[in-house]
Amino acid sequence: MDLIERTIQVGWQHRVLFTEHVFDPANPTLRDNLSRDEHGSPRRALVVLDEALATVQPALGTDIENYFQAHLNGATLACRPIICRGGEQTKASWSAVSEIHAAIDRHHIDRHSYLIAVGGGALLDMVGLAAATAHRGVRHIRIPTTTLSQCDSGVGVKNGINAFGKKNFIGTFAPPFAVINDFQLLATLSERDKRSGFVEAVKVACIRDRDFFAALERDAPALARFEADAMRPLIRRCAELHINHIVTGGDPFEFGSARPLD
């Protein structure tokens, strides 16, 4: 037997940022991340916006357009934000992924461009899959807009859609170029949806961090009133624990069977 064998090592930088009013032209967070192109190539961005979020925040699409107009040195917006249905229904078939692929082709989004998803965890899963498979991977920026996605799914490295009656049967592991958590985008969530992220935080605190659990108990009255000063540290610490597990757990792409945070 003749054999050639080499080890391939790939390094990833997993970057999660926390801000408010990300699409305010005075906020440089998104612009600065779009400008992290070491080749100096012209940059284009395609934005996919969750339909439910666009409905409750009707000015958001215009805010996104105005932001890019104010920061043309960061990237050029390829077209108006694409409104896409979120929730589990967007993960029900390949059709939504195919629509994003078609938009990537139509607007000439290449491997030096950006596909930006603004929405809840299901939309981020679907758009992330489209980003990972178009051109064998285009730069993907996630802007999660629910407490659950800001705490958990939006800061992870998994993308996927459902198939054959199984959740996330078709998917990839592909770390996003950046994740930007904007606390202000949570303002129009229903109380039920706000609590969803709290439940995830309790679960992770029970598994990983006794002090975090004690802080949640202490802040429970403020969290029940959805006070921002209590919600922000909950989201940040929960996200941090998830990222720490991905980076230091020894199995970021889940080749083994251990999934302690799930």
Image (tube, helix red, strand yellow):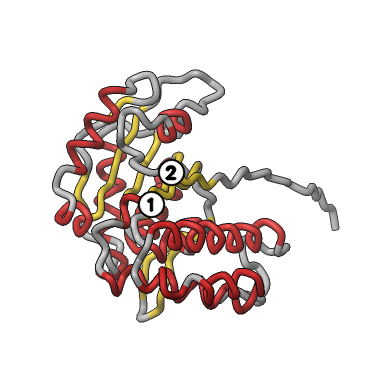
Looking at the image, which residue is at 40% across and 20% down?
42
Where is residue 67? Give x, y as percent.
28, 30
Q: Is residue 36 above or below residue 21?
A: above
Could you say which quadrant of the image residue 146 lies in? bottom left
Q: Is residue 139 above or below residue 34?
A: below
What residue sits right under mark 1 in the picture? 183
Where is residue 79? Give x, y as percent.
21, 33
Quadrant housing the C terminus: bottom right
Give whichever of discs 1 and 2 has the lower sequence position: 2
The answer to whether mark 1 and mark 2 are in CB contact below 8 A is yes
> Which of 150 and 39 lies nearest the eye of the viewer?
150
Could you say which quadrant of the image residue 249 lies in? bottom right
Report the residue that reaches farthest toward the bottom.
Answer: 165
Looking at the image, which residue is at 53% across and 73% down?
218
Looking at the image, which residue is at 38% across and 19% down?
73
SS at mark 2 in the image: strand
Q: Is residue 164 above or below residue 53?
A: below
The amino acid pointed to by label 2 is Thr
SS at mark 1 in the image: helix
Left/right of residue 60 with respect to residue 183 in the rendered view: left
The amino acid pointed to by label 1 is Phe
> Which of 192 and 115 lies nearest the eye of the viewer?
192
What residue sits right under mark 2 in the picture? 19
Where is residue 178? Give x, y as percent.
49, 43
Where is residue 104? Give x, y as percent.
31, 40
Looking at the image, which residue is at 38% across and 54% down?
144
Q: Is residue 19 above or below residue 260?
A: above
Left/right of residue 197 with respect to residue 184 in the rendered view: right
Left/right of residue 194 with respect to residue 180 in the rendered view: left
